[in-house]
Image (cartoon, grey):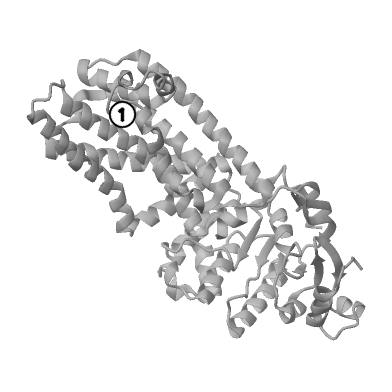
């Protein structure tokens, strides 16, 4: 298991954001986090990235305790979010150079060039980041996230600002990255079709608790619905949702 | 301490300044304005036969020194704000970068800004008022280093406050230094202050630096007592500031505020 979470709890004052969650993710899995707004998805990802201190419980990433081995773990994982930007006054290449150094990437120049090619942004490599479209920004953010060839990739709505064509290319790319390098991908999205298509397993969260966990088909069958979107609506609109 | 990561953060800011004329001008603009306005006032006073010994020397020296402290502080707080403004903070904090490396990079940037602003101020003072601070020699260097350290301490405290309270605390990046200025004996000796304020003033490292600077300018000799007091107080201030930063980082992680600082 590359991610192991045991009895994880996070409270902000009297509000419980994560309520005793336990889950594990295997190497090479694409693992989706689903849930309505306020379900605890973002809090859980932040806990897994060490951006929030847990109230109680244990987080092990790549077999190491996150709190005790922060630096060793973070050098082997990476993160991309449509809500987090890269400095806009730097060019694409300059941004990647800075982060390549932060992650101590060997042969950084070649790695940067290969990522620029992979994401079809070579021609604009020396353009200021502020002049990019939202789709190009997302691709830059993903390129940054792959700089250190991470064993685990955390993606927070990575296709949120992409057009259908680029979103589809991104999904295909993520699957090929997983297939080629066995990268584990932890993924949040509000696009149910995308989740169904890309995820090996999904965890449904609501009010800080796991409502369901399994493959997309298992979850759809368990809820006796046609697709994930219907499952989502059923869960989000239930009163007093309890773990199933 | 991983120096490659420190270098990466410094390089990020060098890229920023490389093509940003407003940012470069900001380093020179305020020293120039201060020197023009206050410099000509001091010349005016001197020509009016105000009986103050070495008035121009003291005043221009104080202006240059104050700017050194202020730029050192801004080197930390504004560089931090650049990360907040560009929504890059989360990218940094999910990287293997240690907080100590982040601080080391900001301190190095601060030295660069201080040296640039200090050199510009010294040059302008020489051009406009025939005041050559370098004639005073190396006696002032220990005091400059003390101002740098105090600038770091104020910068780290204002950065911590912004980290904790968000952009509404941004004003501290510009204002915190000026909050201590009236009590730091920048342009006048501690003895001028009201009696009850003087103990407060003596707790501020910069007070001893500016008192020491005036003594150096007057006698050419280093007043070691002022220097030792300034250095000891600065040691305490910097230690408190760094502890405050780590404490604040802990609180921010506990309260889950880092994502707000990184995306607000």
Residues B175 and A128: in front is: B175
* Drawn side of residue B17 relative to residue A45, left or right: left
Quadrant in the rendering for residue B98: top right
Q: Is residue A191 left or right of residue A242?
A: left
- Name the quadrant of the N terminus of chain B: top right
- Is residue B91 at all visible to an observer of this figure? no
Q: Chain for mark 1?
A: B
- Provide the residue designation for mark 1: B186
Instruction: Work out whether residue A133 or residue A174 is closer to the camera in this orientation and state it.
Output: A133
In this view, the residue in front, A111 or A134, is: A134
Q: Position of residue A204 (x, y in %)?
A: 81, 69
Q: In which quarter of the image is the C terminus of chain B?
A: bottom right
At 35% across and 42% down in the image, what residue appears?
Answer: B112
Residue drawn at 8 percent across, 25 percent down: B49
Residue A175, image x, y percentages = 70, 74
Q: In this view, does B2 lie above or below B153?
A: below
Q: Note whether residue B250 is visible.
A: yes
Q: Residues within 10 Å of mark 1 (few under 14, many from 20)?
A: many
Q: Image quarter for residue B12?
A: bottom left
Q: Is mark 1 on a helix, strand or loop?
A: loop
User: How far across and how far down the image is residue B141, in percent?
Assistant: 31, 26
């Amino acid at each position: 298991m590359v991610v192991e979470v045991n009895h994880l709890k996070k409270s902000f004052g009297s509000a419980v954001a994560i309520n005793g969650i336990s889950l594990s993710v295997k190497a090479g899995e694409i693992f989706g986090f689903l849930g309505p707004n306020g379900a605890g998805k973002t809090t859980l990802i932040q806990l897994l990235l060490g951006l929030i201190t847990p109230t109680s419980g244990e987080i092990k990433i790549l077999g190491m305790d996150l709190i005790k081995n922060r630096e060793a773990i973070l050098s082997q994982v990476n993160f991309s979010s449509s809500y987090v930007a890269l400095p806009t006054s730097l060019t694409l290449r300059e941004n990647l150079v800075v982060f390549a150094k932060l992650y101590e990437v060997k042969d950084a120049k070649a790695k940067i060039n290969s990522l620029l090619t992979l994401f079809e942004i070579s021609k604009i490599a020396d353009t200021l980041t502020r002049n990019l479209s939202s789709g190009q920004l997302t691709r830059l953010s993903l390129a940054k996230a792959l700089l250190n060839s991470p064993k685990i990739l955390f993606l927070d709505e990575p296709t949120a600002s992409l057009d259908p064509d680029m979103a589809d290319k991104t999904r295909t790319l993520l699957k090929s990255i997983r297939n080629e390098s066995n990268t584990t991908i932890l993924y949040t999205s509000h696009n149910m079709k995308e989740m169904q298509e890309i995820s090996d397993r999904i965890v449904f969260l609501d009010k800080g608790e796991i409502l369901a966990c399994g493959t997309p088909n298992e979850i759809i069958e368990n809820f006796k619905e046609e697709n994930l979107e219907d499952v989502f609506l059923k869960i989000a609109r239930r009163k007093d949702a309890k773990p199933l | 301490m991983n120096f490659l990561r420190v270098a990466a953060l410094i390089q990020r800011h060098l890229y920023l300044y490389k093509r940003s004329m407003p940012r470069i001008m900001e380093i020179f603009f305020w020293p120039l304005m201060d020197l023009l306005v206050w410099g000509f006032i001091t010349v005016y006073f001197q020509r009016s036969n105000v009986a103050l010994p070495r008035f121009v020397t003291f005043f221009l020296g104080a202006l240059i020194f104050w700017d050194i402290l202020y730029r050192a502080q801004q080197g930390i707080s504004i560089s931090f704000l650049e990360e907040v403004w560009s929504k890059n903070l989360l990218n940094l904090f999910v990287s293997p970068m240690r907080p100590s490396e982040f601080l080391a990079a900001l301190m190095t940037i601060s030295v660069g800004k201080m040296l640039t602003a200090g050199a510009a101020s010294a040059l302008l003072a020489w051009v406009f008022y025939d005041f050559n601070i370098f004639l005073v020699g190396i006696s002032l260097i220990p005091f400059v280093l003390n101002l740098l350290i105090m600038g770091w301490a104020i910068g780290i405290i204002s950065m911590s406050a912004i980290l904790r309270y968000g952009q509404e605390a941004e004003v501290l990046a510009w204002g915190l230094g000026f909050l201590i200025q009236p009590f730091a004996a920048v342009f006048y000796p501690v003895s001028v202050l009201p009696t009850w304020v003087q103990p407060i003033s003596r707790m501020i490292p910069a007070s001893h630096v500016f008192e020491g600077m005036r003594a150096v300018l007057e006698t050419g000799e280093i007043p070691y007592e002022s220097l030792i007091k300034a250095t000891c107080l600065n040691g305490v201030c910097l230690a408190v500031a760094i502890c405050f930063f780590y404490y604040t980082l802990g609180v921010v992680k506990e309260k889950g505020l880092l994502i707000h600082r990184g995306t607000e």
